[in-house]
Image: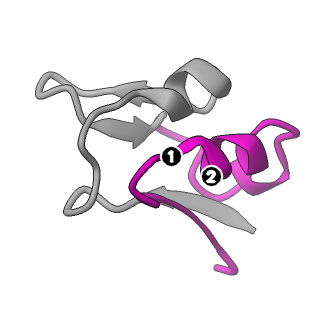
Amino acid sequence: MGVQVDKERCVGAGMCALTAPDVFTQDDDGLSEVLPGREATSGTHPLVGEAVRACPVGAVVLSSD
């Protein structure tokens, strides 16, 4: 299970990066993104579920890939 950030929905609130800073960061435009190399394995991180719930616009999603 992995995690993705939908850049079209992201508003840069940064709740995911605050909740799980070892999985998420914000790019130069202030939009959230998954740290390189964490896409596929981060779905098992204990705080990723919290980050998904914390996103005010639902831009952080778990994927079954």
- Horizontal relation, residue 56 to residue 51: left or right: left
Q: Residue furthest bottom?
A: 64
Mark 2 lies on a secondary structure that is helix
Q: Residue furthest left?
A: 29
Q: Nearer the viewer, residue 49 or 24?
A: 49
Residue type pointed to by label 2: Val
Residue 21 seen anywhere in this rendered image of the structure: no
Q: Which mark is residue 52?
A: 2
**Residue name at image x 20 percent, y 26 percent:** 30
How many dots with numbers?
2
**Residue name at image x 41 percent, y 27 percent:** 14
Give, as a single range, the part of the protein colored magenta. 36-65
The N terminus appears in which quarter of the rendering?
bottom right
Quarter of the rendering containing residue 46 = top right
Q: Position of residue 65 (x, y in %)?
A: 64, 79
Q: CA distance from mark 2 to mark 1?
A: 6 Å
